[in-house]
Amino acid sequence: MAQTKRVTIEIVGMHCQGCVNNAERSLRKVDGVRTATVSLAANQADVTFEPDQVDEQRLVKAIEQAGYEARLPRADEDGQEQQDLAERHAQELRRRLVLAWALTIPVMLVMLPPMLFGVWTHGPAHWIVQGVEIVLAAAVLFVAGRGVLRSAVRSVRSLAPNMDVLIALGSLSALVTGPAFLLAGGPGAHMSFAGVGAMIMAFHLTGRHLEAKARGRASRAIRELVELGARDARVLRDGQEVQVPISRLQKGDVMVVRPGEKVPTDGQVVEGRSTVDESMVTGEPIPAERKEGDEVIGATVNQRGMLKVRATRVGQETFLAQVIDLVRKAQSSKTRMQELADRITVYFVPAVVLLSLATFAAWMLFPQALSAAAGAMRPWLGYLPPSHVSPWAAAAFAAIAVLVIACPCALGLATPTAIMVAGGLGARHGLIVREGKALELLGRAGRIVLDKTGTVTQGRPTVTDVRPLGEVDERDLLQAAASLEHASEHPLATAVVQAARQRGLELKDVREFESITGKGVRGRLDAALVRVGNLHLMEEAGIDVSAARAAFDELRSAGRTALLVARDRELLGVLAVTDALKEGSRQAVDELKRMGMTVTMLTGDNRQTAEAVAAEAGIEHVLAEVLPDRKADEIRQLRRRSDRPVVMVGDGINDAPALAEADVGVAIGTGTDIAIESSSVTLVRGDLGALVQAARLSRATLRVVRQNLGWAFGYNLVAIPLAVLGLLHPVIAEIAMAASSITVVGNSLRLRRAL
């Protein structure tokens, strides 16, 4: 399989789902592009391509050929530089907006007297006034609104019609009625909507400007994350402190970080002791103590003492850079609801154009029947055309309203704006979401499966009991077990070795060491074959464990992991290891259950120990004695039996197959030690309280998405029939259309207060 590469490209100039479809289609036509996903809310494209067939500049060119501005974000730029392209586009939009209103306000002053008061000019004044209105309206459309018209033409040529097609058709149709009105001889049965065309374009540009500002607030997450990073670093060079830009830092550089300064990049403390505020990347408010040998995360703030830190990751390798990349990717990903909305919007604009033509034809064919509704409402809706207007004037009024009231923009923004705000908020609280679908599924989850070690418990076991049998001494028992376990990397082995060292015991060399998955270890100490493990290991070796059975069962029922130690065929004794619950585990489990979720603990421990730990944590469902290679199978079985998504929470490394098998895999850890690529959601903090926050954020996001989609669908279902019946003035229709998009974005912004 050919090697692939992924790149994020910033795009400026998109304003509806049609633009998204156009940009995606242009990218997918390029040879070598595997996938291309464009986000309207984030103004970016996420592209996977084969670098031996196409380069990044060719992808940028493809987007530019579709009619938009594009650029590749630089790794060393700050948040301000990233806004330059968008700011230039915003300034151009503001200039066109000011020009549009400068020309439209005189048009409104000309058209309001006849529309509201029935006051018409006559004779030469009539021709002059109507001529001025047509000229000013044409200037609004072809000068201030030329970007909209160009966008409409481009989207039609690319067979991906966007919202601008509806606005262009609506405003141009209204403009054409002006000359037709003059040719028909002025006031009477005919009406001019030329001024309406200008107002449609002016309000459209206003709505686009306000929507862009609201989307800018929604997309602030990336800029805020980028701005967390330090701009420069103080580095030791030849014994002297030298200040260098962050882009010139190299691995191995020793940085000097004084109190109150940001740690420039990820590294390891080589000198000093201090507390470090990591809340900006982990969400943990309590400062962490850091000393020689400890890791520190770039962008965190040193509080008390001076630290010397050796840089271990720079540039795009840093933890913060990975978080920013994952947030960007999540903002470009699409949920199932978004995919449904996208499929609808592909056909939306052509369907609205056809509906508008059908509306015009219906009003021409059945004017009296359709005028009945308008006639009944005319006393309350003063903006409706008079009853004596010609059928074509009434038909044009309704058809233009249909064109501008329909709004695919709100549908296109409903999901991505909510996902974008939630993703940024989560990142600032140490909740990293790799894809929008994970938020959707986590919000609907019915079962949470928690791995025991390191998730429910601290993952730092300690030896609590050493119980030798017969003539065996405690030190001999512990020395034999620790010497063998020294060759293992299992957390229980680490606890045994640590206990031996605390007692000053010398460890012996091991030969023929072997780790037996799910059972224990064995190896030779001197000439003897020593085994350390569970009952299964001893029974397979034919070793009699009856002498230790009572102690073994007692320790397991107390929630401890009991390890049997044997030398050749002789049982030496029992060791007990316990792993205390993490602080807050019980409270988090109780809260998850209050949220209506079933909590299950999954572990390789024996059932007695597992149930004791589960009882302490308030977990009622336990899957015990599950070997590591069987965890994914257990998750698969749970998914088959559940009608709601299943979430697996583990350390992201040992549980990778189970995390991948679950509907949502959640990796939980601390700082840079987590494998953040191994799961759909990563909790930077190592406690289950972060899982509760993630569940709350997901449910809040799902609620907002449903509200947004409900509003977007409901708005169109109500507004379009009113327009067909001729009960909406085209200008009011355009204002309502713009307001619908702004409402959706504004509702998504409420998520910034979800945590």
Image (spheres, rainbow, N blue to C red):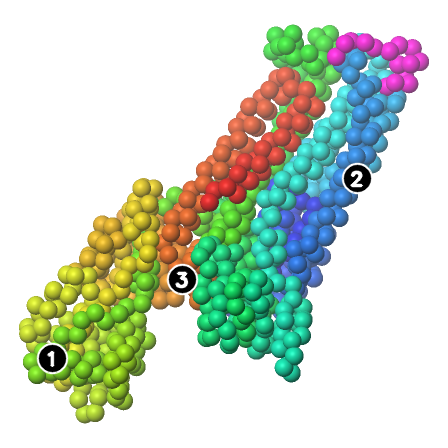
User: Residue 674 location in percent, x, y?
Assistant: 43, 64
Q: Which of marks 3 and 2 is nearer the N terminus?
A: 2
Q: In this view, does 260 lie to the left or right of 496?
A: right
Circle on res. 571: 1
Residue at x 49%, y 39% (from the top left corner): 705
Mark whose residue sits in front, 3 or 2: 3
Q: Give the range drawn in magenta.
A: 116-130
Residue at x 26%, y 76% (from the top left corner): 499
What predominant SS class does the magenta segment belong to?
A: helix
User: Residue 594 location in percent, x, y?
Assistant: 31, 42
Q: What whole-number distance in Å separates the C-alpha atoms at marks 1 and 3?
A: 37 Å
Query: Is residue 609 within the magenta segment?
Result: no
Q: What whole-number distance in Å separates the C-alpha atoms at marks 3 and 2?
A: 50 Å
- Depicted 28 relative to depicted 404: above or below: below
Q: In this view, does 216 lie to the left or right of 638?
A: right
* Mark 2 crowd level (few <14, some 14–19, many ≥20, 10 Å Cα): few
Circle on res. 35: none
User: Of 149 and 204, which appears nearest the observer?
Assistant: 204
Residue at x 63%, y 71% (from the top left corner): 234
Residue at x 6%, y 74% (from the top left corner): 547
User: Of 648 and 572, which appears nearest the observer?
Assistant: 572
Q: Earlier in the sequence, mark 1 or mark 3?
A: 1
